[in-house]
Amino acid sequence: MNDMTVVDNTVETQSIKIAAKDVNVYYGEAHAIKDVNVEIEDKTVTAFIGPSGCGKSTFLRCLNRMNDTIDICRVTGDILLDGEDIYDKRVDPVQLRAQVGMVFQKPNPFPKSIYDNVAYGPRIHGLAKNKAELDEIVEKSLRRGAIWDEVKDRLDKPGTGLSGGQQQRLCIARAVATEPEVLLMDEPCSALDPIATAQVEELIDELRKSYSVVIVTHSMQQAARVSQKTAFFHLGNLVEFGPTGHIFTNPEDPRTESYITGRIG
Amino acid sequence: MPTIWLVLVLIALSITGFFLGRHRALASANGNSKDLHSLPVYYGNNVALTALVPALVVMAIWSMAQPLIIDSRVSSMIPESAIDEGSTRGLVMSDVRRVAEGLNIAVAEGAMTREQAHDLRSGFSDIRGRLGEVGVALGSEVRPEVLRAAQRYRQASSTGNLAMTIVVALTALAGFGWSYSRTHKDFRARNVVERGILALLIIAASLAILTTVGIVLSMLFETRNFFGLHSWRDFFFGGTWAPNFRGDSELSFLPLLWGTLYISVIALLVAVPVGLFAAIYLSEYAGKATRAIAKPLLEILAGIPTIVYGLFALLTVGPALVRFFGQGENGILGVEWMSGATSVLTAGVVMGVMLIPFVSSLSDDIINSVPQAMRDGSLGLGATKSETVRQVVMPAALPGIVGAILLAASRAIGETMIVVMGAGAIAKFSLNPLDSMTTITTRIVSQLTGDTDFASPETLVAFALGLTLFVLTLGLNVLALYIVRKYREQYE
Amino acid sequence: MPKKHGNSLLELTDRTKRRNAAETRFKAYGIAAIAIGLLMLVILITTIVGKGVGAFQQTFVTLNVELLENKLDKNGNRNLDDIKKVTTFGYAPIIRGAIEAKVKELGIETPLKSKDMAQLLSKDAAAQLREYVLAHPDEIGKTVEFRFLAQSRVDGYLKGRVSRDSIGNDKNISAAQLDLVDALVKVGVIKKTFNSAFIFGSDASDARPEAAGMGVSMVGSLFMMLVVLALALPIGVAASIYLEEFAPQNWLTDIIEVNIANLAAVPSIVFGILGLAVFINYMHLPTSAPLVGGLVLTLMTLPTIIISTRASLKAVPPSIRDAALGVGASKMQAVFHHVLPLAAPGILTGTIIGLAQALGETAPLLLIGMVGFIASNAPDSVASGLLDPNSAMPAQIYEWAKRADPAFYERAWGGIIILLVFLITMNTLAVILRRRFERRW
């Protein structure tokens, strides 16, 4: 672990963006997440790490209620976004997801043009009054996604024609186009090659300035490189949560230590 | 039925061969089966198959070829003068075959003795009348040339049949003897038998090609006869369908094509929206329980035979439409727009109902093969389910759904019973969906059922129509299957 | 707390409300589509049952018939050949006498002559009685109780199909005759009972719908299915084994595959044309024979069977083949000893479904002449079952639907019930087989 460069936690203490209290998730009979309590700060990259099947992705999907699309999934406990319970009956997940965007493991551009991919979110949420505004949003988002220069000449070409890394950055641009407050990323680099991974990681660090970013990763190096806070999940439990540097250099729980040193995983 | 007897004898020979072959192999190894190259059954099978299969193949080829050869032989007997103007050699030959067949039946039923049939002279005896008594109707009195040819035809057929029996029997015996003599403990029986079986498997698989070739050839052949009797210009570019068995028919397929397409379009207008929305609901919204009940129930509609839909069109939907749009003052709408139960709308609606499950199950498959990641991407951006379906899933599934609709269209165009019973028999170009109209399939049925005379253009036109139908549906199918296959590959 | 979107998650924006309304509408379209489909199914089934169930009941008239010796056996020696010489015309007066006597005995007032009374009976009545006498010559001279078929208008009257208003100018029945029917129903002489002859009997001519049955055409269908089973199953399985297990990837295999996919979608009537051109016009097989029907349906069913058989072969995991090859079996042995038995339930299911499809198919049968004559005699041997002209269930239904008399329509619907019972049984069997033997690897 000596090649690890721990990012210094230079950002000052932030307001709490998402607070989870006693969250339990069940898939039918299976108890997938057990009593998880966590507070995610604004303008911070929070990494969820842990061995496969530990529940980190499941928990991530709870944060914008993507689990609603799975019939047998049941969530108890409270998850507060800016102090409002997102599982409240009055909350429409559609509105929630506009504020809590998501980027997926495999790049999944729609079979439409690059422009339409990015414009999709603003269109359905009615964020642009006219074509000029929409153009502006698309350009801004693509710039934020650090892909504008590569695609500006072929906005009308299908998004599926891009390379893997470009596709993933397009998906990130697509997610930021709805102006979310939180960005959830589910192993965004697992399907990418090292160069594309480096580009996306750089982008994540950039995004931290405007958003609260939560990233699930199976790569400890990646967590160390991009995050300020790290949460370690094991068998559905949140074992340890704290500043990334602290977790990686001085874990308190023996399970965290085993995982970081490569004994479990 | 000598053919059946021949087959039975062959089978008996083959079974005997099995036991003898096995016995001989064991004997050559002094009863110790471990000394044999292959298991004893393979030696038996070797003899059995070698005795049976080549003989059966010879028999099949012979029975296919014999009519061809005899036909060409006999047809050269007919002098040019015996062929009327406007007729062809092929048509005279069909008369010859009919007379020959009639004589056979007459002999079989005891209405004539073998000698009488052989020595018949036209003019001396009323052949038409006598054959009519045994149920073989002839169009006109038999002319001497035709009668002579028919007798020659009978004679050649019976000689041919006898020769075939002999040749087949010899082939079987030769196969039996050869394989039996080769049976020895060092003989690689398993390899030989397995090669033989592989050959049989290949033949079975080639039957699909043979069927297609059969379809195309049989229709091409008769279509050529048709165009010999009737102008192809009238068929393709004329505007009227008016068959007249006294001659001077106008036989254009355009009005029929119009009826076919009109009915198909109505059917698709019913089936596509309903089937597509049903598929969307089942794959995107319905819970497991709903899906488990609704899907098989809908598919029952696809399992109901078309005759049932035909009856439904004729006796239920048609009269119901008449109650709305016909009957003048007594009708529900008080209008007199419809004169009978059969109409484009009747057939179209019922066909649409039949196609609902076809469209829905094909679309269901296709919608399900759109990757879940695509839906997640859209839902993750805060799209509602319907927005996801309309703006992401549907565009992604579009090629596949177009393919499914083309397949449904091909079904609609080729559907027979519903239009035979529900569409009517009037060939015309009309835009009124309450008019009775006719289709390609309906006309094929009506031209080829009842008393048909395979020498008249009015009958032969059915083959030209059949070929048109085949080409039309084949084109749609190939296109649709290609699109669907390409679509599947995209997500695999 | 700063909010970029300016409003709380707990309040729905107008836009969200509109979008949710659109969502609800879209979902409603889906539900409506399914409802339409299911409604059609319900309408279809209720129509079939409602209109067809009547065919399973038939109206009979029970009379005491005096089998007069001087009319039926003038010589009095009970010689069957002599008795046969008496045609149905000879029996008509006896029947007239019987019904007149019955009416008189019951003391029913009617202006009708005995000829008009006898019109209440089926035109088949005399033939029915003659058949009975030929079977029981000893009964001549005695008086026997005999159950005659009522004519179709009387039957329709009892079933509500014919009413006093509807008979108008019908020359087959008059109001006075219906009065007599009412009186006879009251005393139980005319009665509606279960009609096994509809299921087991033979077809009858245009004028006698009350005597028509499905039995003979059922036998025709049975023989066709036997032909299909005997040919399509082995050929289909053999073709599938070759394509799935042995075929090399080359142009020939491609052509075969494309061919099979296309044949599965070729309109059934085209197979009828093929049958007519090849089996009847070229090979001179007999018209209307179940053998020809079976051959045509075999060609039509083959692609279905091949497609489902290949799917079941594909479902057997390669590890099974490897295991067999690993212990030294040849490829052929691996397929026939291991793969084929494991795929058998799936093959069987596919075959049953293919057979069910073939059983309901009508269009090709029209072209090879299985419609248009009266299937009156059941075949007496396998050869005659295959080669003698016969009808088939769907062809018989079509035949009845073409005849103008509403009494035949009732029989067509009834025929459909029988056909559907067969289809449902076959499909249920296929589902049970699939459930019972379904294997998940």
Image (spheres, coloured by chain):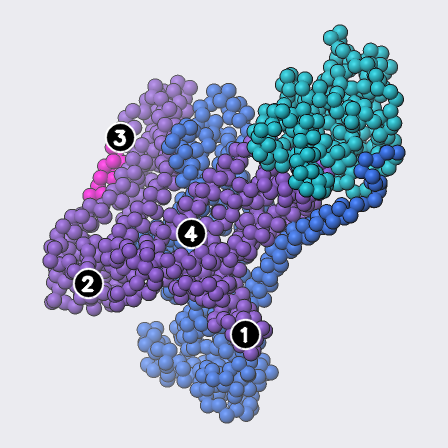
Q: Which residue is mark 1?
A: B335
Q: Which mark sits nearer the N-terminus, 1 or 2?
A: 2
Q: Which residue is mark 4?
A: C268
Closer to the camera: disc 4 or disc 3? 4
* Tint applied to chain A in the drawing: cyan
Work out whether mark 1 precedes mark 3 in sequence or the reverse, and give the earlier one. 3
Chain that appears blue: C
Rendered view: B115 above or below B393: below
Same chain for mark 1 and mark 2? The answer is yes
Contact, mark 4 vs mark 2 (Cβ under 8 Å): no
Q: Where residue C214 sits: x, y (%)?
A: 47, 63
Residue B112, disc: 2
Q: Are marks 1 and 2 in contact (CB under 8 Å)?
A: no
Chain B colour?
purple
Q: Is residue A225 above or below residue C3?
A: above
* Chain for disc number 1: B
Tell me the quarter of the image containing the C terminus of chain B.
Answer: top right
Whether residues under marks 3 and 2 lie with C-beta atoms below 8 angstroms apart, the answer is no
**Chain letter of the residue carrying label 3:** B
Q: Upstream in the sequence, badge 3 or badge 2? A: 2
